[in-house]
Image: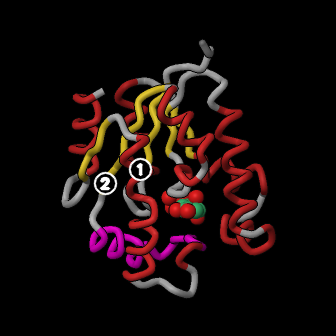
Amino acid sequence: MNNIANHIFIIGMMGSGKSSIAPLLSSQINIPYIDTDRDLIEIMDAEIQDIFQTLTKQKFYDLESTYFLEHVKGKQHIYATGGGIILKQPNRTMLQNNGVTIFLETSINILYSRIISDHNSNRPLLFNKLNKDTLKEILIERKQHYIDCADIIINTDNKQLNTIVQEIIQSI
Ligand code: S3P
């Protein structure tokens, strides 16, 4: 038996709305939330794009994993995770065994249009090759992991944020 709190994990591709949903859900159910990307930016005092460039992508995922697996030992939180959190087996085991994991499922067309219209977007995975095919390849590679980790799958296509939050509340 472990002593890890019963967390709420929000997973899904970049652009699926994790960082927008987590604070809304948090204010409705009174559980604090964290955004792992935002925390890593603060801790490293660098943008994710810079971390990718100076340390490499794999090192970013290592850092993310170390931070995530350590943070979950603390009190109960809602986690807005980075899209790549499901790439590492220890992260997947954590997601599967220590709370409720919600996969925000979003179609490629919608992900793509959100990402290109987000001018503040800082998404190194798509840096210099922002096209639908790249995004599609990433989704194909990851989708089964998202599904395997999820207790609840919420399709977010054409839904308002509040509708998604209500769906989550009803299903947890
Ligand atoms: C990544 C997604 C990003 C960020 C990093 C890697 C990924 O987070 O963690 O750029 O591999 O999908 P968001 O999903 O919040 O954009």
Please say if the residues under marks 2 and 1 sit with CB atoms less than 8 Å apart.
yes
The residue that appears at 75% across and 69% down in the rendered structure is 56
Report x, y in % for residue 148: 40, 44
118 drawn magenta:
yes
Q: Quadrant of the N terminus?
A: top right
Numbered range of the magenta stretch: 108-124
Which residue type does callout 1 highlight? Tyr
Dot 2 surroundings within 10 Å: few (below 14), some, or many (20 or more)? many
Q: Quadrant of ligand 1?
A: bottom right
| Residue situated in front as seen by the camera: 60 or 118 | 60
| Residue situated in front as seen by the camera: 52 or 122 | 52
Give the labeled residue for mark 2. Answer: 105
The residue that appears at 45% across and 80% down in the rendered structure is 134
The residue that appears at 52% across and 50% down in the rendered structure is 86
Dot 1 surroundings within 10 Å: few (below 14), some, or many (20 or more)? many
Looking at the image, is mark 2 or mark 1 earlier in the sequence? 2
Give the labeled residue for mark 1. Answer: 146
Report x, y in % for residue 163: 21, 44
Mark 2 element type: strand
Report x, y in % for residue 83: 50, 57
